[in-house]
Amino acid sequence: MTRKLYYIDPYQMDFESKVIKIDEDERGFYVVLEETAFYPTGGGQPHDIGTLNGVKVFDVEEAEDGVRHYTKEKLPYGVVNVHGSIDQERRVDHMQQHSGQHIISAVFHDQFGIPTTSFHLGKDTATIDLDTEHLNDDLLKKAEEQVNKIIRDNMPVETKWMSVKEAAGYPLRKPLAVDGEVRLVVIPGIDYNGCGGTHPNFTGEVMAVKFLGWTKNKKQVRLEFVCGQRVLDKLGQKHQVVTGMKRIVPKPEHQLVEEVYEMIKVSKEKDKRIAELEEQLLQHEAREILSASQGERVIQRFFKARSIKVLQSLGKAIIEEASNAYLILVSEQDHQLQFVLAHGADVNRNMNEVAQQILPLIEGKGGGKPNFVQGGGKKVIDGETFAERVKALL
């Protein structure tokens, strides 16, 4: 089995090792080494990435034959030794997030009686599932303060290999799921946990923790958070957003939310008024069309760039007054034709049947109620010709 240097020194980012095996499986080419500093996926922590002799390592997994390093290309035939290099930024980030999670889970469990049931370390944020159905702002504030105090206290983070029997002598929060030797991660007086992940030597290296919010997840809650450099990254992102907002809304930061809310409220009121005026215009247009039709059996109109929604509204307004007429409304878009076919209350005909006869003309789709259908398709013929073809059917 591969000797795991990341357990000996999690800060070791470069190493030399002998090649044991070069092979290929469904994931691609992989290399097994005599010893490695690459951490494989496990325990909620993603794998390291880096290079072997300059060849990119994109995945690392533990298998029966040792730790497999999956490479973008196959290492040259006959290579005996390799130089491995870990992506330091990713490794340190994972150490910060994972150790931060240990502290967060410890505080929620010990201070508030809420155990953690699962942990996920994502690319941008991390989450834990907590065995409770609700969190409140006051509890979150207190928990976050406690977590950051432990970080500032710069307490040691120790790792110890021991038997399961020996581990039982520590105040573990949950029973160990392994036999034989177990690796215990210990923050004295704070956390005692069986864990195979990488961690810094002191809590101060976690830098800080910020809770980002929570959502319900079945009968539990999922708490989202960031630690370490990710806190600064999030702060930078939010600062950019706020700075951009202040250019648009020249108000102090603490007034931005209220000001934007008022702007949205005013905008919605304007949209509502515009919609009412547009409806009035459509009603007026419908009356003009009815007046101009002078009792025609088929009322037919062609438009440019009018939406199907407008056609539907106009069509309904016309048909309400034209009880014994057919209606054809057609609109040309850039590369499409859209239409409404309808008839008044005194006409007995299923317009779906008419639509099915004319839809092949535009390779289209459509349907609706027997007295009112809508549809659209490709503009393979012009709108006026299409309308005339429909009129001929009626």
Image: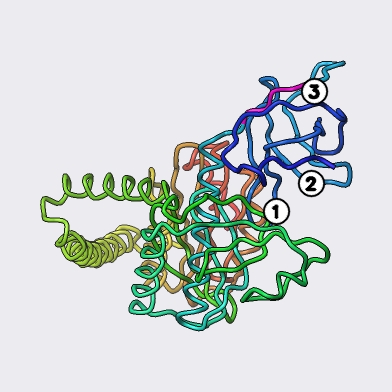
State which tag comes first along the sequence, 3 or 1. 1
* Of pointers 2 and 3, the one earlier in the residue sequence: 2
Total marks shown come to: 3
Under circle 3, the secondary element is: loop
Q: Which residue is mark 3?
A: 74
Check disc 3 and give the amino acid type.
Answer: Lys
Q: Amino acid at mark 1?
A: Gly
Residue at the spot 39% in from the left edge and 52% down from the top edge: 207
Mark in the foreground, 2 or 3:
2
Q: Name the disc covering residue 42, or none.
A: 1
Q: Is residue 350 above or below residue 4?
A: below
* Residue at 43% over, 79% down: 135
Who comes first in sequence, dot 2 or dot 1? 1
Residue located at (64% from left, 44% from top): 363
Q: Amino acid at mark 2?
A: Glu
> Residue 232: horizontal and vertical position, in percent?
35, 47
Q: Nearer the viewer, residue 110 or 44?
A: 110
Q: Quadrant of residue 26?
A: top right
Which residue does the numbered mark 2 point to in the structure image? 62
Q: Secondary structure at mark 1?
A: loop
Q: CA distance from mark 3 to mark 1?
A: 25 Å
Quarter occupied by residue 163: bottom right
Residue 24, compared with residue 360, is above or below; it is above
Look at 50% across and 70% down and name the residue there: 190
| Mark 2–mark 1 distance (CA, rounded to whole Å) | 9 Å
Q: Position of residue 200 (x, y in %)?
A: 52, 49
- Label 2 to label 3: alpha-carbon separation: 19 Å
The magenta region covers 81-85
Residue 290 within the segment the image draws in magenta: no
